[in-house]
Amino acid sequence: MPNTEFDSTDIVDVGVLESEVTNTLGARTVEMETRDVSVWFGKRKVLEGVNLAFHKKTVTALIGPSGCGKSTFIRTLNRLHELIPGAALAGEVLYEGNDIYAPEVDPVQIRLAIGMVFQKPNPFPSMTIRGNVLSGLKLSGMKRSNHDEIVEHTLTAAGLWNEVKDRLNNAAGDLSGGQQQRLVIARSLAVNPHVLLMDEPCSALDPASTLKIEETIRELSKDVTIIIVTHNMQQAVRVADYTAFFLAAENEPGHVVEQGATTEIFGNPQDTRTLDYVNGRFG
Ligand SMILES: Nc1ncnc2c1ncn2[C@@H]1O[C@H](COP(=O)(O)OP(=O)(O)OP(=O)(O)O)[C@@H](O)[C@H]1O
Ligand SMILES: [Mg+2]
């Protein structure tokens, strides 16, 4: 008996398959995308028409002068924005092709898949190092039994394991600022995010801790998609595959002036405002 389903299946030409594989590798797969995102606080529009795509397992830097809307934008990517009173949003934010603001979507699940690390390290200071790493799991109600493994794995990925493995039961507040920030990164990783948003994660850190976090970011990007806001141009060049330059003219909403490969944005920008900004001529 012939299998009708099989009979009706188109036999795909191998040449077509090969070209599809090449295209996927060449273009990289999109993990997140914003379509025409505009943002208001009350009546004031602070961002206009942001279209950006973030590719899987790459690092994208968001740069631009103070007040142009970088933090506001990054908060729209995991629905932290809507927690601010008076905040409104238009446009679409797609994660794996689906709008994260669709009515049936649970924002808690979105924030687990799309984690966030803030400017100021925010561990629970009196809780142990180990307790901090596992706290996100507990709060989210995720049941996983291999806690020792998770603690070691995430602290290793965050570049902190060797420094804390002998004092996992000490309070997190005893760690230095740079160590606390890496602990917070480990805590975000424990819930297995696909995307990690970082809003100036090194701005409160010394240069040595900053380099450690940058190494961590490069390592993590083998598994996770990273979007990082930074005022440090060298940092963008060191860690980011792609860069987007935001700018707001006086009393106007912020927008993206230029986006592309970091080497292009810094080495061969198309817009003179980008050229001036990356060369430190304003902002
Ligand atoms: N909670 C809020 N309520 C009202 N306005 C806000 C709020 N948060 C930010 N804004 C306004 O939105 C605009 C963008 O602010 P945002 O913090 O996103 O800028 P930024 O690019 O992150 O700046 P910085 O580099 O200084 O961190 C600013 O004009 C700011 O005053
Ligand atoms: Mg900011």
Image (cartoon, rainbow, N blue to C red):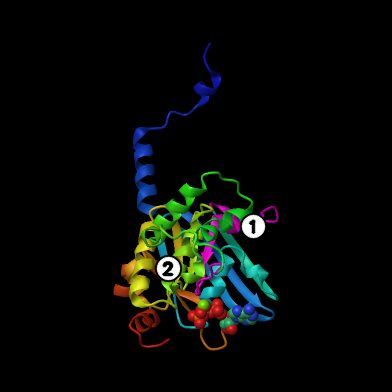
Magenta segment, which residues? 96-125
**Residue 180 position within the rendered picture, expressed as x and y whole percent measured from the top left:** 46, 68
**Residue 45 position within the rendered picture, expressed as x and y whole percent measured from the top left:** 62, 79
Q: Which dot marks residue 179?
A: 2
Residue 15: image quadrant is top left
Q: Residue furthest left?
A: 267
**Residue 142 position within the rendered picture, expressed as x and y whole percent measured from the top left:** 60, 49
Residue type highlighted by circle 1: Val
Location of mark 1 (residue):
108
Q: Residue furthest top?
A: 1
Residue type highlighted by circle 2: Gln
| Residue in the foreground of this view, choosing between 68 and 82 | 82
Eye-nearest disc, 2 or 1: 2
* Residue 177 magenta: no
**Residue 41 position within the rendered picture, expressed as x and y whole percent measured from the top left:** 65, 78
Q: Is residue 155 visible?
A: yes
Q: Which dot marks residue 218?
A: none
